[in-house]
Image: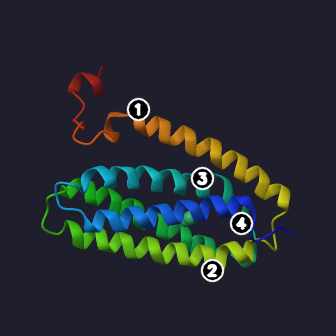
Amino acid sequence: MAQQSHQFFELLKNDHRRAEQLMQQISAASREQRQEPFITLRNELQAHFQIEEKFFYPKLLPIQDMKALVEDALDEHQEAKDLLLQLEKIGFGAEDWQETFSKLEDGIRHHHEDEEQEIFPKCTQFLKDQDLTDMARKSVQEKEHFLTRAAKSSSARPGARRKPTRKEIHP
Ligand SMILES: [Fe+2]
Ligand SMILES: [Fe+2]
C-alpha cells in the first residue's frame, strides 16, 4: 500500500496551492492587470489536468471503489476547461468577467478539496509506492514540456493571439 505523504501527492498539492494563490491575485487585480496572471493560471491548470488525466486517473478508473469519485473529478476538470475558454472569449474587460471567474474559482477550490480529502487518501489502498514514484517522475517531465510548449506558443503571450489566415487553414 502506498503512503499518503508520497512525493506525487505533494507535487499535486503544491500545484493546487499555486493555483489558489493565482486565483486570489486575479480576483484582486484591475481589469487591465488580470490578463497576464490569468494566462499563467490557464497554462498551469491545463498542465495539471493533463498530468492527472494522463498518469493518475486512468489507473483509478478501473477500480470499482474509485470509479464514481474519478468520474466526478473528470467532470469538474471539463467544467473548469469550459470556463477557462469562456473567460478568454468574453474578453478581460467584460462586465460579467469577474462573475464568471468566481464560478471557476469556486469550482477549482471545491475540486481541490475533493481530491485532497477523498481521492488522494482513498486511492493509496489500491496503488503501490512504485506506481506513485513512476507517476511523480513522469509528471515532472510532462509539466515541464507542457509549460515550455505553452510559453513558446503565441497564445501564451497576452495580446498576441490572432486568427489564422485562410492560407494557414487551407494551404
Ligand atoms: Fe489536482
Ligand atoms: Fe484534478
Nearer the N terminus, badge 3 or badge 1? 3
Quadrant where the N terminus sits is bottom right
**158 left or right, relative to 7:** left
- Residue 117: numbered disc: 2
Q: Secondary structure beneath disc 1?
A: helix
Nearer the N terminus, badge 1 or badge 4? 4
Write the residue at 33% across / 64% down.
25
Write the residue at 30% across / 73% down.
102
Bin the neighbour count of mark 1 within 10 Å (Cα to Cα): few under 14, some 14-19, many 20 and up.
few
Q: Find the distance from the CA under tag 3 to the CA under tag 4.
A: 14 Å
Write the residue at 26% across / 42% down.
158
Amino acid at dot 2: Gln
Residue at numbered disc 1: 152
Q: Secondary structure beneath disc 2?
A: helix
- In the image, 54 versus 108, the foreground residue is 108
* Distance from mark 4 CB to nearest ligand 2 atom below 8 Å: no
Q: Is residue 170 above or below residue 154?
A: above
Q: Nearer the viewer, mark 1 or mark 4?
A: 1
Bin the neighbour count of mark 3 within 10 Å (Cα to Cα): few under 14, some 14-19, many 20 and up.
many
* Distance from mark 2 CB to nearest ligand 1 atom below 8 Å: no
Which image quadrant for residue 117?
A: bottom right
| Residue 108 rendering spot, x and y as whole percentages | 44, 70
- In the image, 152 versus 90, the foreground residue is 152
Amino acid at dot 3: Ile
Residue at numbered disc 3: 51
| Residue 101 rendering spot, x and y as whole percentages | 29, 68
Bin the neighbour count of mark 2 within 10 Å (Cα to Cα): few under 14, some 14-19, many 20 and up.
few
